[in-house]
Amino acid sequence: MNGIRLTLRKTLDVPVEAGNISPRVFAGRSLAEIEALPLRRGNRSTTLSALFDVTGTSARMEEEVAITLEGDAAKLRWIGHKMRGGQVMVKGSAGFYLGEEMSGGEIVVEGNAGSWAGSLMSGGRIEIRGSAGHYLGGGYRGCSAGMTGGSLVVHRGVGDNAGYLMAGGVITIRGNAGQFTGVRMKEGHILVEGDAESRIGALMTGGRIAVRGRVASILPSFSIDEVRSRVRIGDERVQGPFYVFKGDVTESWNGSLYISIQSNPHLKPYESKIA
């Protein structure tokens, strides 16, 4: 694995469109060619070398390229855009659209990530060791689907609308989740190990959402179906027991919510409705 190290020269004061910071783009390029890659800083064009000290060597094949980014990259957007292989390590935080349209490879962020991390991804793995913003693994208005494959892991909390339009893959949230988790979800799996705010699974037509913490409430368009001792989320068997709710009835009955019994004593009245 060949490595390129990018070190920010100073704190960024405006957003930077950094889609060229990707193994897909670095592969087969010399150090001088990488330094000359264009970026967009605010409303002005710039180059990689104007913002970063660039060291190391690249590789001919994308899957052999490893990029390490040092410094506060919270204003860098589209890191790892459309990557199909290789590795990106962010030694700090990352901005919006991390790994957008990613189909392979791995991105690890040691800090936080902005909104739309993993948007439209179809493969590969993203790990965010801090928190993430809104629309994790989601799509955009007018899209038919958001995330369709791959794995997204966030070690702390996430904002609203995680898994919006999700149609495949696995999202694991080790902390708490905001409102509308899994909204309009079609397929795939979401695991929330912490608490989830209201409207979980709204308008979902398929897939599974499991919550090990407390949920604020269950939408009236979901009906309790049974109790399960565990649930399979991706390759992981998650121990319960769980209440299983089916819905959203406004769309179909094909979505499933697995809600921890132990963490949600306020849901006990639902037990009388189990057939």
Image: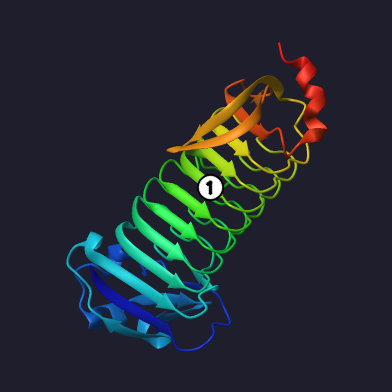
| SS under mark 1 | strand
Residue closest to the eye, 180 or 171: 171
- Image x and y of residue 115, in percent: 58, 59
Residue 35 in sight in this render: yes
Above or below for 263 versus 120: above
Above or below for 206 versus 210: above
Quadrant occupied by the N terminus: bottom left
- Residue that carries the numbered disc 1 in the rendered image: 172
What's the residue at 75%, 32% (across, down)? 218
* Quadrant housing residue 251: top right
Task: Name the image colouring.
Answer: rainbow
What's the residue at 63%, 55% (across, down)? 158
- Crowding at label 1, few (<14), some or many (≥20) Cα neighbours within 10 Å? some
Residue 139 in sight in this render: no
Above or below for 20 versus 138: below
- Image x and y of residue 170, in percent: 48, 42
Q: In the rendered picture of this protein, how many numbered marks are placed on residues?
A: 1
Return the residue found at the far top.
275
* Quadrant housing residue 35: bottom left
* Quadrant housing residue 80: bottom left
- Image x and y of residue 274, in percent: 72, 15
Q: Amino acid at mark 1?
A: Thr
- Image x and y of residue 82, in percent: 36, 56
Residue closest to the eye, 76 or 243: 243
In the displayed structure image, the side of residue 80 where residue 271 appears, left or right = right
What's the residue at 61%, 21% (across, down)? 252
In the displayed structure image, the side of residue 248 where residue 42 appears, left or right = left
Quadrant occupied by the C terminus: top right
In the displayed structure image, the side of residue 48 where residue 116 appears, left or right = right
